[in-house]
Image (cartoon, rainbow, N blue to C red):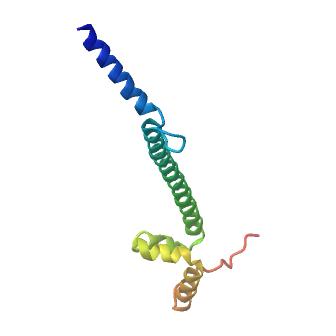
Amino acid sequence: MRNFYRTERRRITEKLLDFVSAPDEHTPSPFAAYCDQMALLFSARVIGDIGRLFNQASGLRGRAAAKTNEETILAQLPDWAVLASQFLPKKLMVKLLQNPVMVGALSKMQRGNGATQPEESTHRDE
């Protein structure tokens, strides 16, 4: 029975040494090749995750800047345009906000078509 344990122990030790030892100078051991592959997979996943995090962060910054820009432009628009922005399709409103000159032209057209303008008061307090 002791012989069996000795021979099994020797066989397992040889197999383990074969797995971690390089067969020659130019060939890595199976264990080294396995570790290399695992390191490549791990680093690829880490780099992918970091890239996704950066893309998400830049996307969030871009959306926040666009929202701030949209709010700034809406604050400068005439009252009718702000009201219209609540009813216009989102795509059309985005196009309008990207081109504020268009809103200014629409505003001039509205004034030219007989729309009432607030009149200045001729009454002076003395």
Q: Between residues 48 and 40, which one lies in front from this camera angle?
A: 40
113, 73: nearer the viewer: 73
Q: Position of residue 41 (x, y in %)?
A: 44, 46
Query: In the rendering, at what x and y percent does residue 49 appear?
Result: 48, 48
Residue 80 in sight here: no
Question: Is 89 left or right of 103, judged from the image as shown?
Answer: left
Above or below for 44 versus 25: below
Residue closer to the observer: 29 or 37: 29
Q: Residue at x 44, y 77 (%)?
A: 92
Could you tell whether 10 is left or right of 98 in the image? left
Q: Kindly identify the residue that appears in the image at 48 percent across and 36 percent down.
A: 22
| Residue 16, image x, y percentages | 39, 27
Please give the name of the residue rendered at 55% of the width and 60% of the height, measured from the top-left corner: 62
Instruction: Classify the position of the N terminus by image quarter.
Output: top left
Q: Give the residue furthest to the top.
A: 2
Q: Position of residue 9 (x, y in %)?
A: 33, 17
